Amino acid sequence: MSPGREALRDLRRRECAALMATDAARAALALHGAPVLLLDTARVRRQYRRLRSALPFVRFHYAVKALDHDAVIATLADDGCGFDVATGEELALLERHGVDPGRVIHTHPIKKAAEIADAIGRGIRTFVIDNETELAKFTGVGSDVSLLVRLAYRSPHAKSDLSSKFGVGAFEAERLVTSALARGIRVAGFSFHVGSQLDDPDRFVRAIDETVALMGDLERRLRTRFTVLDIGGGFPVAYDEPVASIDDIAARIRPVLAPLVGRLDIIAEPGRVLVAEAMTLVTSVVGVAERADGRWYYLDDGVYGAYSNVVAEDVHPLVFAERELRSDVAGHRWATLAGPTCDSADVVANEVLLPELAVGDLLVSPAMGAYTAVTATRFNGRAPTPIAVVGFAAQSPAERAALASAV
């Protein structure tokens, strides 16, 4: 194991140990049993403030799709964060929290005409499009509604290169702006997304440079004026190996964005980076077997549940035995971890080094806040894994200090 991965594993182990030692975590386990997701909203707030401090001239809109829990929405709304929605259901969630629609943007490039009308009726004024069919749906909507044209930038090193499904190149972008001007539709600027979980700060820089150059070129040739640059999301999270931090990425893109301040409204759509580290999954062993390829442990959560990020996101979550968080345990062995459904594809991880486990033993996975609960299914009729809020407000001063020192 590389020194960087070993240091990350040690950090995650200390975080999990501190969390599992709190009264709040123990109370959640007593109430819900396993599996359960432990959500610390203080970490959400801390990540948002880190972003805001690192890029003070960027206006952030949390991508609700990453984790749509009420406590997350309330925490970010209270701290002044904006929001990015992709559906009317996500917008309704924000309405229940009293979020001003002026703080909300709608970034799904493909929408039914009825969804557009509903969102406009509820106060949304900024939308994203990437093709002529979608542009036509905004004909006659009024001058107070503005569009962002989504650009496509290939990022082969991203976990998910979103350019394959959404976004256009420079030629098509010009055609869309020209068509919008002819239709009397306002294009405020451009958006892009460099790809999900992209550990490449230079790719952010190149995408910004190319977008700004395109905006300047079109402004000169089409005699129009753009006011918004949306740099999307994609900020990575360290799951089982180190990645560029918020500060690393900000240090690279700050010099590129700073000259644009005052000329453009710079916005971003972070999701994963705000919530991934804020939630921890606790599962229990429900079965043990010796198979041809070694020891298998069967858990009460799997890839159709909270471990859905394994399949949908190609995430490799760390897994600790709860008792090895409390003290050193000897006698580790390699094992396969499988989920609870009656399906052979429900395998969480192979070759995980764990102590000898028995039915009822607990396992703990950190950084399970993003694209886990939201992408889980009801396969085999299984209920969603409950989420228990165990934020700092629920802990004693000593427990808060312990968790802070672990981070």
Image (cartoon, rainbow, N blue to C red):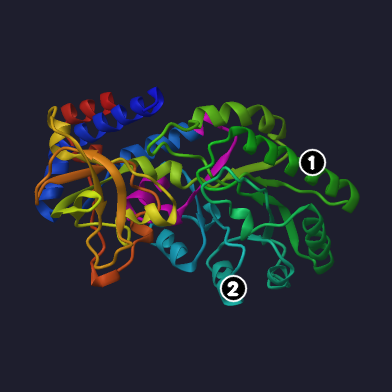
Indicate the amino acid at tag 1: Ala
Q: On the image, numbered disc 1 is attached to which residue?
A: 213
Q: Nearer the viewer, residue 338 or 205?
A: 338
Asked which secondary structure carries label 2, the reply is helix
Q: Quadrant of the N terminus?
A: top left
Looking at the rendered structure, the kind of residue marked 2 is Ala
User: Which numbered disc covers residue 382?
Assistant: none
**Residue that mark 2 sits on:** 117
Q: Is 209 rendered above or below residue 14?
A: below
Residue stretch rendered in magenta on the structure:
52-78
- Magenta stretch encompasses residue 70: yes
Q: Is 258 displayed left or right of 97 in the figure?
A: right
* Closer-to-camera residue (318/210): 318
- Does residue 407 appear in the picture of this structure? no
Task: Give the foreground label among 2 and 1.
Answer: 1
Q: Helix, strand or loop at disc 1? A: helix
Q: Pinpoint residue 202: horizontal percent, then vertical percent.
A: 63, 33
For image coordinates 45% across by 57% down, the residue present is 65
